[in-house]
Image (spheres, rainbow, N blue to C red):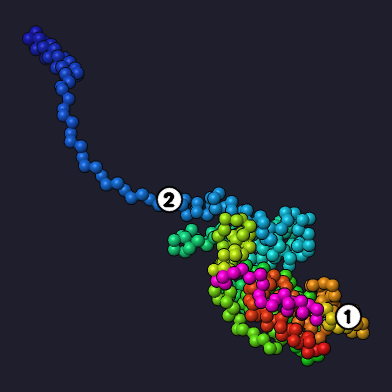
Amino acid sequence: MKINKLLGFLMILALGVLFVNCTSDPVQGPPGQDGVDGVDGVDGVDGADGTASCVSCHSNATREPIDAGFAVSLHRIGETWEERGFYFGGTACSKCHSGPGYTEFIETGTITPRPELAAPLDCKSCHGSHESFDFENDGPDYALRNTAPTSLDLAPSIALDFGDASNNCITCHQPRNSYEIPTLNSDGTYVVTSSRFGPHHSPQSTMLEGILGAEIAGSEAYDPPGSAAHRQGASCVQCHMGESEDPEIGGHSWTPIEANCIECHGAVPGEANGFSSDMATLLALLQQVEGEGYDEDEDGNIIPNGEVVIGIIRPGSESSTNTGIFSDVAAMAAWNYKTALEDQSRGIHNPEYTKALLKNSIEALQNEN
């Protein structure tokens, strides 16, 4: 029995010594040699700058000349209702003279009367959100609100297509639908009901196309629509928005750059040949035309009153018209005069069409007397 206890004690003592040896820290040997470095990997290809296409337009260097040009343009008239005056006499005016009005018309085809229409045109009037950011494949769309062909107010069946950005101009730069274009008719008369008779203010697109004049037959032929040299070989944007170091010329000032004229014509024409002379002759004839006054009954019917009215264009004025009953030929000639006047290019947009309208009108009035 005592031997067994002794053996057990010895075994416990041996295990304790073994446990102590197992848990003691070993002596650290010397460090091994460094391994051989691996082969360098191939550099990856640099990715495209995610903001490069945005910066090309949305940088101060790009934006500041645009702001400076727009500030001196006729598109930027007045900041407040008072400064802009009659432009907001109705929603018809706001279509082109109001930033919110133009935007709403392009998007919906209508305009809602509201005080906000007093806001002037600004960048957001013509430019909205980008339709595409894939400029490489889709091209820079400049976020223009309207690049599609535009139907004309006076002739809805006609949609002018000047190409992309220039189509944005047609919306407003066309004759308004205030008055019907006069034509020869069975009773030979035309009633002028307003001092503002004629194509209201901006027939540039239709003059460039060579349409919507009152085409009186005469010695000058009318070229086919769309055949004018400026219509075939240029565009609104090309002539009016060229690059320039001067913010008051080209770009968003829309003042044509003389270099564009010189490139094709070798000089800068002040007007189409004979324009001033023909306009002066036609104006004098229109100021001498005789018409008849009228009254209206309770149903709005026109009743001649026998009063003599001198001048379909008021004597002493270059644009205001007399109200009255005039010959259809006189009304057509007045329409053509006002078209050439309101075009404001002095015949340059379409010299041949302008010449035909003016000279044939002159001949027709001279033959009436």
**Type of amino acid at the residue the image marks with label 1:** Val
Which circle marks residue 49 in the picture?
2
Return the x and y of residue 336 as percentages of the image width and height: 73, 79
Q: Position of residue 367 (x, y in %)?
A: 78, 89
Q: Residue 343's x, y, as percent?
A: 69, 72
- In the rendered view of the protein, which quadrant contains the C terminus? bottom right
Residue at the right extreme?
Answer: 306
- Graded by Cα atoms within 10 Å as few (under 14), some (14 to 19) or many (20 or more), the crowding at tag 1 reads some
Crowding near the residue tagged with mark 2, few <14, some 14–19, many ≥20 C-alpha atoms within 10 Å: few
Number of residue marks: 2
- Residue drawn at x 74%, y 84% as measured from the top left: 361
- The local secondary structure at tag 1 comes to strand
User: Disc 1 and disc 2: Cα gap in Å?
Assistant: 72 Å
In the rendering, which numbered label is found on residue 263? Answer: none
First-in-chain label (1 vs 2): 2
In which quadrant is the N terminus drawn?
Answer: top left
| Front one among 319 and 96 | 319
Q: Residue furthest front?
A: 266
* Residue 207 in view in this figure: no
Q: Residue at image x 55%, y 60%?
A: 243
**Is residue 65 shown to the viewer in this render?**
yes
Specify the label residue 309 is tagged with: 1
Residue type at tag 2: Asp
Nearest to viewer (mark 1 / mark 2) = 1
| Above or below, comparing residue 15 to residue 347 in the picture | above
